[in-house]
Amino acid sequence: MSYFELRNGEKLYYEDTGKGEQTIILMHGWTSTHEVFSPCIPEISQKARCIAYDHRGHGKSKDANHDHVTMDTLASDLNELIQGLGLKDVTLLGWSMGAGVAMNYMSVYGCDALCRVILCDMTPKQLNDETWHLGLYQGKYTEEDRKLDAGKDFFSAYKTFAIGAVPKLAKIPGFLLKRPLKKILAECDEKTLKSLSASMKEKDYRESVERITVPVTYFYAVPGSLFSPELADWYREHVHTAYEAVPFENSTHMLIKDHPEQFAKEVIKVLEQ
C-alpha cells in the first residue's frame, strides 16, 4: 500500500506496479475506485509501469475530502502526482470521470509531461442543448434535468445514473438493487460525490480537445449506455493530432468490466505504437 501526500496534507492511495520503460496512469470514474482496473493491470504491467490511484473521496482516498472538490481539484491532484513521482512521457488513461480529469488536466497544465492520452467513454460536455447532442444519457440530459436532479435525494439521483450506465439494472426490483448500490456509495464520501457530479456538469472541454498536442486514442462502448458511439466521430473531427477510435462491441459504459481482456490488449496496442 502506498499513499501520495498532497500539498494540503491529504493523502491519495495509489498502486505502482510493473517495471517497463513506459509509464501509464490509470484514472477511474465517479463512484468507482482503482480496483476497476485490477483485472487488466497484471497484463498491462508486463509492458509498462502502471500507476492506478483513487481520486479524493473515493475508495482508499475516501478521507481526502476536506476541500470543496471539483474537477479542477482532481486535475491539480494529478499534476501533483506526476511531479511528485518525477514522471515523464506518461500515457494518461482516464475512464468516465477519469477521462474528464485528463481533459481538465491538459486544459490547465498542457501535455508536456505526456506522450499520449487514452480517453474511455466520456463526453467533453455532459449537458445537451440545441447545438450539442453528444452529452449524458445519449443526448437526452439537459439543463432542465440537472435542475430536477438537484431536488432529488442523493441515492435516487445515483440510482438513475447507475441504471443509465448498466441498463439491465432496471430489471432488478428496487428493494434488491438498493443494497449493492448502497455498498458502492459506502466506499465514497457523499459530499465529494455531489460536488464532483455538479462540477462535471458545468464543464465544457470541447475547445480544450482541439488544443491537445499528443496522440489521442478513444475507447468507446457499442451500443453504449451513458454516451453515444457517435462521440468517436466528433473526436476524430476535433483532435488535431494522431487519432484512433477503438469500439468495444456489446458493451455498456462499464466497458472495462464488460471486456477486461480486450481492454488490456487494446491498451498494450497503444503502448506499442
Image: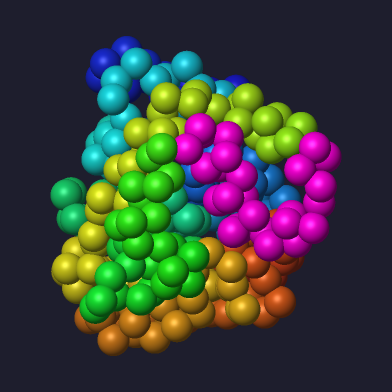
Residue drawn at x 39%, y 20% is 65
229 vs 47, left or right, is left
Residue ranking furthest to the top = 9
Give how far across and how far down residue 86 sits, in percent: 31, 37
Q: Nearest the camera: 141 or 223?
A: 141
Q: 8 above or below 264?
A: above
Residue drawn at x 59%, y 72% is 224
Work out whether residue 83 can be spotted. Answer: no
Q: Nearest the camera: 116 or 37?
A: 37
Give how far across and how far down residue 71 sits, in percent: 30, 42
Q: 245 above or below 254?
A: below
22 vs 73, left or right, is right
Is most of the magenta stretch helix, strand or loop?
helix
Magenta-drawn segment: 152-177
Give how far across and how far down residue 94 sits, in percent: 45, 55
Residue drawn at x 24%, y 78% is 131
2 vs 194, left or right, is right
Work out whether residue 193 can be spotted. Answer: yes
Quarter containing the N terminus: top right
Q: How many marks?
A: 0
Examine the structure image and report whether residue 169 is included in the region drawn in magenta: yes
Q: Nearest the camera: 78 or 72?
A: 72
